[in-house]
Amino acid sequence: MQPTSVKQLKTVSKNVRPVVDAALAAGGGVLRLAPNWVPRSFLHPGKRLKLHPDDLYAYGLNRGGIDERWFASTTEAANDGRVPDEGLSYVVFEKKRVLLKDAVAELGADIVGGSIWKKYRRWPVYSKFFDNMGPIPHHMHQSAEQAKRVGQEGKPEAYYFPAQHNNVGNNFPFTFFGLVPGTTKAQVRKCLENWNKGDNGILDLAQAYRLKPGTGWLVPPCVLHAPGSLCTYEPQWGSDVFGMYQNVVEGREVPWALLVKDVPAKKHRDLDYLVEQLDWEQNTDPNFKANHYLEPIPVADACADGYCDKWICYGRIKGWQCVSAKELTVAPGRTCTVRDNGAYGLITVQGEGRINKLRLNCPKLIRFHDLTEDEAFVTEDAARAGVVYQNSSATEPLVVLRYFGPEVNPNAPDIGAAR
């Protein structure tokens, strides 16, 4: 009998290769992953992650509600009071579990591919669902250069709003991006000066865009954004750095510590430094939407014979492809073979079927310790050889989202290609 709960698994932390090799053989180059839940103390869960309502505060009320699920992650969550493995994904095989981080460290190129392993010596990206009842504070993620000053890495990211997780828009399905063209550094500095005087008014300097399920955005480092209340699929660099520039959200205080958590200690009260962290050209771009908005684009020759593959996250940041992502839909009763250039993390958002030798099944409701059949990691060798997707339903499509590492898809479209 297969285990159904994390509590039934033995954690293997040393000499993990035998377990992972056996898992790869059993899955045809595909690894089963366990759900990976992350809370945020300063946000209000949106309740669309399929997590049981009794488990929203499974980490404890003091830790905040669970509003994120991370996929194929080897990146630790930067939360105060975190548990040791918070944010890290586990490979599950028979009655054992192994951190994906440990599997990659031991098997290297056999999992993530030669080029990524040679350059990064790890799986350098991850994706997540973040799901909130209302908006997130207007914030930015530091660049690689800025984050390096505190021993961290920068964080570019992309968004996609899957329809399957957005049957309701919750309280504020709009996102503020950047700053209104013409905004001055003095105006933003004034907002920081007023941090302890009530709402600092940073949103008075920004403009919001209505969010539409089935579309997305590309967000470079150093660009302010206050994500709205759609449940969001977010492929991104493997980092959890950020700085909150808004001090009150829906009446809730955002502490100064969340503005400066990834800033050198000697700069914690240096308002000019905090203002200069922002990329002013991009934040005040009068063509911001045209340069960052994403519509899905069919992959060439991949919308026939009962399946359709689409680019959902694409584009480059200063010439660099940080991440990319696709959405695959397989019609009821159909089977297809899909070849990709590199390894990827996968989450099933609708339907049931198989991926190579493993079952796929999108659950209706998940308990905190449940093991599911909706998430997987596909090695580069398997992806290049071709992965077989089979939809076992006679009535419902099988829909999966998959994200890829840096520079894996040079044939991905540029922003604006959908217009």
Image: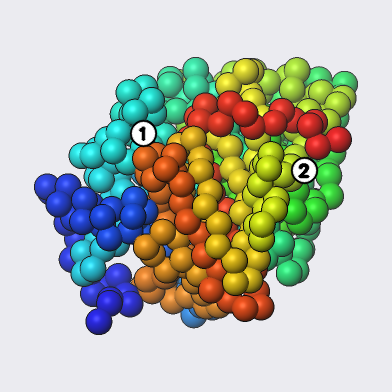
Residue at (47, 25) in percent of width and height? 147
**Residue 281 image offset from top left, x and y in percent:** 75, 17
Which residue is situated farthest in the front direction here? 305
Name which quarter of the figure residue 122 lies in.
top left
Front residue of 232/43: it is 232
Tell me the tag on residue 72.
none
**Residue 358 image offset from top left, x and y in percent:** 38, 64
Quadrant where the image shows the C terminus: top right
Disc 2: which residue: 295
Residue at (33, 55) in percent of width and height? 28
Front residue of 151/418: it is 418
Quadrant where the image shows the N terminus: bottom left
| 288 vs 327: above or below | above
**Disc 2 marks which amino acid?**
Glu
**Residue 319 image offset from top left, x and y in percent:** 62, 18
Front residue of 363/54: it is 363
**Disc 1 marks which amino acid?**
Gly
User: Is residue 190 in view?
Assistant: no
Front residue of 143/406: it is 406
Label 1 element class: loop
**Distance Cα–Cα, label 2 vs label 1:** 29 Å
Which residue is situated farthest in the left direction here? 15
Looking at the image, residue 55 sits to the left or right of residue 212; the answer is: left
User: Is residue 318 in view?
Assistant: yes
**Count of numbered circles on the image:** 2
Disc 1: which residue: 113
Name which quarter of the figure residue 60 lies in.
bottom left
Looking at the image, residue 108 sits to the left or right of residue 264; the answer is: left
